[in-house]
Image: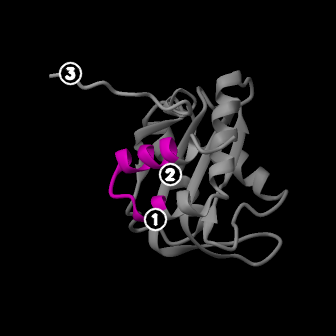
Amino acid sequence: MRPYRIVMSRVEPLISNLIHPKAVCLDIQGVHNKQELIRFLAGLLFEVGKINSIDQFVNAVYQREKIGTTLNSDGIAFPHGESDTVISAGVAIGRAENGIFYETEDCGGGLAKIIILFAIPIKKEVTDQEGFQVLARLLVCKDFLESIRQAANFESILTAVRKYGDLLK
């Protein structure tokens, strides 16, 4: 019998340092608006050691939000903040089945059902930038987003990242 061999996806090394299992919540409860949502996800990043100040990071996210909307018409929000409070690049992923009202400066807002919060350090590593680029391209892939909508757990998300990330050229 041949030993089982795990084959690593070509995108996996780019993503594995960005997404921590404890920074993923696939059933957000008790969050009622954009402000609470961003603070909740920032709290996950704080808990896994990606940021050292929730307040300062949330402020950086709000500063970026003033530039333009980070909510698309499919209910996907991708807020992000670049700050010296970011210890290491990271991503928090949240899903709210019924959606959370996500107010925007330019178009009023809408319901966000999938939220991917990017924590971007001031000094970026090349691999972090490549990982963020892969995730950004995945956000426009309908099949990837459907996989996130259906994901049962963190491993399901990684499987989708591997599958659809490897299709990106």
- Left or right: residue 127 compared with residue 15: right
- The answer for how far apart the CA atoms under marks 3 and 1 are is 36 Å
Label 2's element?
strand
Which of pointers 1 and 2 indicates the residue nearer the eye? 1
Above or below, 45 relative to 101: above
Q: In which quarter of the image is residue 34?
A: bottom right
Above or below, 135 relative to 141: above
Q: Does the magenta stretch include residue 164?
A: no
Q: Mark 2 points at which residue?
A: 93
Closer-to-camera residue (13/54) = 13
How far across and how far down the image is residue 6, in percent?
34, 27
How far across and how far down the image is residue 75, in percent?
61, 71
Which quadrant is the C terminus positioned in?
A: top right
How far across and how far down the image is residue 14, in percent?
58, 29
Label 3's element?
loop
Q: Does the magenta stretch include residue 158?
A: yes
Q: Mark 3 points at which residue?
A: 2
Amino acid marked by disc 1: Arg
- Mark 3 residue crowding within 10 angstroms, few (<14) / some (14–19) / many (20+): few
Amino acid marked by disc 3: Arg
Closer-to-camera residue (119/149) = 149
Q: Name the residue under label 1.
A: 149
Q: In which quarter of the image is residue 35?
A: bottom right
Which quadrant is the N terminus positioned in?
A: top left
Magenta span: predominant SS is: helix
- Can residue 89 be seen? yes
Residue visible at 55% across and 54% down in the picture: 39
Above or below, 72 relative to 154: below
- What residue span does the magenta drawing correspond to? 147-163
- Left or right: residue 28 compared with residue 116: left
Above or below, 149 relative to 117: below
